[in-house]
Every structure is written in structure tokens, then in C-alpha cells.
Image: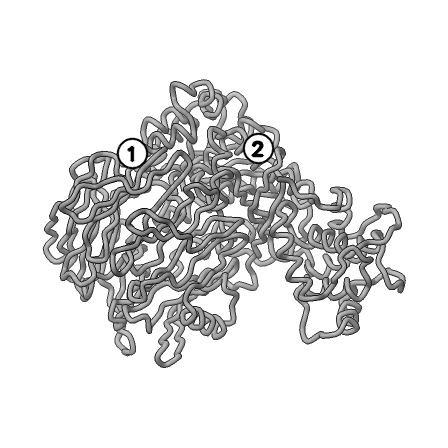
Amino acid sequence: MNKRFLTASLAVILTASAVIPVSMQEVRAANETSSQVEVKEEQLSAKEFLDLAVTSLTFQHGSVTMRQQIIDQWVKGEELKDLSANIKRDEAARILVRALDKEEKETTLAEYQEKANKLGLFNGLSNSETISKQDAVKILNNAKKVQNGVNNEGVKEISVEDFMKNPGSFGHSLSPDGNYITYSAEWENRSNVFVKKMNDDSEPVRVSSSTDRDIAGSFWKDDNLLYVKDKGGDENFHIYSTSFNGNEEKDLTPYPNVTVGLLNGLKGVKDEILIMMNKEDAKVFDVYKLNVKTGKTTHVAKNPGNIISWLADRDGNVRMAVASDGVEGTVLYRDSEKDEFKPFIEFEAGEQVMPLTFSKDNKHIYATSNKGRDKVEVVKYDLEGKEEVVMSNPEVDVTGVLYSADKDKLLYGTYVTDKVHYQFFDEDFEKLFRKIQNKLGVPESELGINDYNKDMTKFIVSVASDTVYGKYYYYDSTTDELTELATLSPWLNPEELAEMHPISYKSRDGLTINGYLTLPKNKEAKNLPLIVNPHGGPWFRDMWGFNPEVQLLANRGYAVLQVNFRSSTGYGKEFLEAGNKQWGLKIQDDITDGVQWAIDQGIADPERIGIYGASFGGYATLAGITTTPDLYAAAVDYVGVSNIFTLLNTIPPYWETVRNMWYERVGHPEKDKELLTAASPIFHVDKIKTPLFVAQGANDPRVNKAESDQIVEALRARGVDVEYMLKDNEGHGFQNEENKIEFYNAMLKFLDSHLKK
């Protein structure tokens, strides 16, 4: 819908080197709890001390940018003007007090040194004014003791059910007039839609009655409430209407083997919305008007066979489309629906131009684009195709924008480095955002604007972090009142959950690899069993935030490593394309290098490494135990690819328009037969000696059941026992609560049996 958050990242398909003046020996010495390493006595400059402190006290070992951002938080303004000068004790004290987040009301160097002495940072040192390299190792060892503050006893075990059961009411949104709020909550073990009248004591009303499948989402059309659902995980989503009392539910798109998507809410048009549907041809999506009262559909735009997206103007007329052969493409434009589409902007392999919305006068288009550049930026085009860059970031892609139709401007854009960050374009909206942020007392990375009414006076906002699943609030800007609506999984205590640390390291060929490391709470980060968890996609990325399965693993004493390997989105075109035709090769090397990094830091026990992933992550799991069979002591493949040839033969029909993209990024089954044979785990089962657990949904339209069947049958034919969980009522990943709980219980039992001996 036009007013909603417009994402600029790629859709989930299958979900120069820094010079750091410290050696790995010094890193390991700094990371030891008690160091016996003999270090040559020499004075340290301020720059050398800062670099050593970043390496020791953070996990940013590969990203120059992230290291500098950390240093900028530790050294402010005109402090340390000469970084080449020897670091003094009181200056080091100020840096470390800030690094350990112990700063309170200190203003003078003497006060910082007094705080550092109380923390015991200088225990075992002489009283010299400057600091030697040997002193620095001792100081940083002391700082790590303060930072860790653990007794190595861990925390109490939390049940799988508590992590994986329905978290409560979520997905809150407002009706356009702001008088009603909708959300999803559990009924009969499934997520259903509820409606609550605002500023009213009446009980919420359940308006859907799904018992077979969770409702995937809901949205408003004026005073009509609609929701979306598939059957058994087949991803053929239909749009349903429901009355406010829930007595009348209707499938508005009751066509078999058809999937539907919302294109435009048609503001000002009574009872009609624009949808995309592959009803006429399973391979492509045409545009229809859908009457939300009667279900009547009217054909609006015919897809000639190569259109991958459509865009309607502010009057609801479909005037823009993106045509692509999967590699190269053209943005098409027409003056009216009576005219023929004509080329507007062409883009080459590796480039993307994605129109987001028309301006209020229909004379400009906002889009995201990396045409002629490495990073995705937000741009504005006039109808002649002249471009104006609105927002860019030198380090990462712009990931999304919030556009106000009434103000006819972008309110903010977001980008993700270590966490989500905002760039504002509207002063009034930034003031409102900061006011809410201050009321909630959270960093901007933890605050989200979820929804608002048409007048932008009433808002649904949320707060989430690595240890907070999520909290929803209602904010009325006319009264400045903030009301808590719901807390997700309130039975989970954030104080008992594990922190997720942004990390970076260098790949063996010099790329900066970013990711996240979650360490078990109240456990020393030393010789831990480690689960590396490659993400799906692979054209996707992991982000900082609450992850129930990561928290479950950490609660059971595992360190969890998530790696944004090459081909991950968000880091620019060059980084993504570095993963082209590198399945099982350099992509896998990036994952292996991450595991080796964790071993080198002393965090991971090299004898107790497990790998677990879903979708492409499941493929990476199988590739890991065939390419590096000695590295892993246990492996869990969840809806993963085992045979790239059969994967390419069974992709959903509506992916046909991007088939050439698969050939470009993964490989062609004929031209690259040797490559794909080498990269497909099914042809290398003889190398597998790692214990394997496989889970699969029978209705998976992306990674067919045959992908799991093949690997299980091939191993069993060799006499290898493989645990296999198959669910007949699931698709690409388990959604039904009882299946999720069963899977994670089984996975934990499997991992524990092999990694906790």
C-alpha cells in the first residue's frame, strides 16, 4: 500500500584490506583471561592502543569503517589530537570506561582514572604515566574480566515451547481513520486476526477462524478488513475478506494454484484494490481490479511474459512496469493506460532499478537504483528519465524508505551496517521520532514506525533488540500519549537472554565479511561448542535483532555464528556478484573462514563445531560437510538444496521470468555442468562422515521434497543412518506451532548428542 514502508532490498529467493597494527599473537594475548605471553617492552601510541582495544574488546576485526565508528564513540571532539603521541594512563582510562559502558558523570581525566582504578583496570601495573605494549595487554585482560563479568555457570534452561510457541499479539496496524487497531494472535493454535476499537473498553473481536494455517498478514481497504493466507505452505496466497464480527469470511480469489499479491490500495476508490495474480498464466502476474465486497475481478494490464513488477500512479492507473530477462532489464513507462509502454530506463547485468511510487502530481518517480554505481541509492526521476540522488551511503545499500503521500516527500530512509540506522528528510517527522524515542529510552536502531493513520497523527511503533522480542505501542501525537499495546513472549526475561555482537573478519582472499556472534549468557567465551548458521537466499542477509532459534541455541550453551558471506545483499553490487557461480566454493570459504576466525579467537572448541541452516543455508550445511568434512561434528539441513540441477528444474513457475538470473548467479545446467556437479552435495555423499539431521516440508514450492529425499536416500544406501523429519502440512520452513516445537526439540537433542560429549 502506498503509505507503507517501501523496502529496497532484493527479494528473498531461497531467503581493499585493512592495515591493523596488531598481530594475531597480540590479539590472542589480549583475549586471554590471564596472559603469560612475553611482550617486548615498548611504548604505545594512542592510535596503537585504540586499535588494540578495538581488537580485544569488540569483534570488529575486519571492517575499517566499523572499527573507526567504535573509536569515534570512545574518543570525542578534540580529545587525543595527536594520535601518534604516546598514550597516557588517564587517557587510556577514559577510553576504557567508555568502551565498557561504565561512563556516568565523569568530566575530567582524573575522574576517569579514578573510575578505572575502582574497576580494577590497572591492577598489577606500575604507576608510570605512559603505557607500554606489555602494560596494554594486562590492562585489556583486566577490561575483559570487567566486560565479561561471568561466573561461567550459564543461565537457567528455557523450554523450546517458550521460544517457539506463538509469542502473543503481533503485527499491529491502524485502520485509515485511526479508530480501530488490528493484530494477529493465537486461536486454536493458529495466528488469526483480531480487531479492537481504540479508546474503548470493549473486548477485541476475532474476525478470522483459520485452524489449518496461520494468517500470513492483514490490511485495511477503507473500512474493509482483508487478510492473506496459503494452504499447507504452498505459497499460493489468496486474499480473504472478513466482517467485523468474523461471521462472514470469503476467499476473494478462489482460484486453484494461483498466488495473489497486493499492488495498490486505490485510495479514494470505493471497494476496489489493484492486485497482481498469475491466473491466466502461471509464469507471470497480470494486474486486476478486485472488488473487496463481491470478489469480482477486472483485467487491467496483461503481462506479455517478461514483466516482473508493476507500479500505479497516484490516481491508481498502471503506468510503469519493470521488464527483465532475469539479467538485463528495462523500466517501462506510459502516459496513460490507453497508451503503449515505452522504454524509460535500461539497466544491465548486476544492476537494479525499482520504482517505488509516483509523486503527488504524477510527474516524478521515486525509485531505488544501483545503475552506474555499486550501492543501492534512493533516486528521483522526472518523466524524461533525469535522475536526482536523494539518499546514498558509501558503505552499504539503502534498505528502505518511508514516503508520505500527503506531504509528497520521503520522511526517512534506512540503511544497515551493524544495526539499522535512519537518515531523515523531514524535520517535523524527525522531531516526532526523537520524541517517541526519548519517551521509550531506546537507541534508534531498536525503534520502528509500524503504521499510522491517514492524517499521521496516530502511530503504531515497536521496540525490539537482540534480547527483546518486541513491544508494541500506540502513540497519539495530538495528546502526546504513549500507550503500551503488547509485549511479545512476555514470559522471556531479557536479562536471561544472550547478546548478539556485530563482527567482521577478512576472508582468505581479502574481502571484509560482516556478521553476528551470539554468546551464551553468563558463560566465558572460551572453547564453547559453536553452531555456524548460514542464512538463506543466498541473496539475503542476517541482521541484528531478536532471533528465537539463535536465542534457543545460546540458552543451551552454544555460541552462534551468523555470516553475511559474499552474495549477501546490502553490501553493494560488487560484493553480491563476488558470489556468482561460487556456491560451494568461495561462498563456502567465507563460512569456513568465519568458523576458523572463531577458533582463532579461542571462542570455539574446534572439536565441537556444528552447522545448521535453512533453504540456501541448508545447502551450505550440506556443502560444508562435503567440502570440509573434518570441520563439523554435527549438521542440520532444514529445507536445503542437495542437487542444483533438480532445483533449477523445479523452481515455481512464477520464477521463470528470473531464470536467467539463476543461470548468471548460480550456473547453467548445460554450460556449467561440471561446475554444478562439483557444487551439488548429492554427488559427493561419499565424503560425508558428519552426523546429519534433515527436515523438510512436503509442500515446499521452492526447495522440493525431492531435494531432501535424494540426500537421505543416498546416505541410507551407503548404510549411513540419517534422521529425517518430514511434515505433510508444511512448505518452505515449518509454520505450524506444533511442528516448530517438535523440530527444535529434535534438533537440540541431535546437536547435544554430538557436540556435548
Q: Secondary structure at mark 1?
A: helix
Q: Amino acid at mark 1?
A: Thr
Q: Is residue 85 above or below residue 508?
A: below
Number of callouts in the render? 2
Q: Amino acid at mark 2?
A: Asp
Q: Quadrant of residue 283?
A: top left
Q: Quadrant of the C terminus?
A: top right
Q: Residue at x 52, y 65 (%)?
A: 443
Q: Nearer the viewer, residue 550 or 23?
A: 23
Q: How is the image coloured?
A: one colour
Of tags 1 and 2, the one toward the viewer is 1
Q: Residues within 10 Å of mark 2 (few under 14, many from 20)?
A: many
Q: Is residue 711 above or below residue 172?
A: above
Q: Position of residue 672 (x, y in %)?
A: 43, 20
Disc 1 versus disc 2: distance between alpha carbons?
30 Å
Q: Disc 1 marks which residue?
A: 657
Q: Is residue 231 visible?
A: no
Q: Disc 2 marks which residue?
A: 589
Sequence-earlier tag: 1 or 2: 2
Q: Nearer the viewer, residue 723 or 482?
A: 482
Q: Position of residue 387 (x, y in %)?
A: 37, 49
Q: Residue at x 16, y 43 (%)?
A: 255
Q: Secondary structure at mark 2?
A: helix
- Residue projecting furthest to the bottom: 479
Q: Is residue 107 left or right of residue 595?
A: right
Q: Position of residue 169 (x, y in %)?
A: 35, 63
Q: Is residue 328 left or right of residue 582?
A: left
Q: Is residue 302 visible?
A: yes
Q: Is residue 277 left or right of residue 745?
A: left
Circle 1/circle 2 CB separation < 8 Å: no
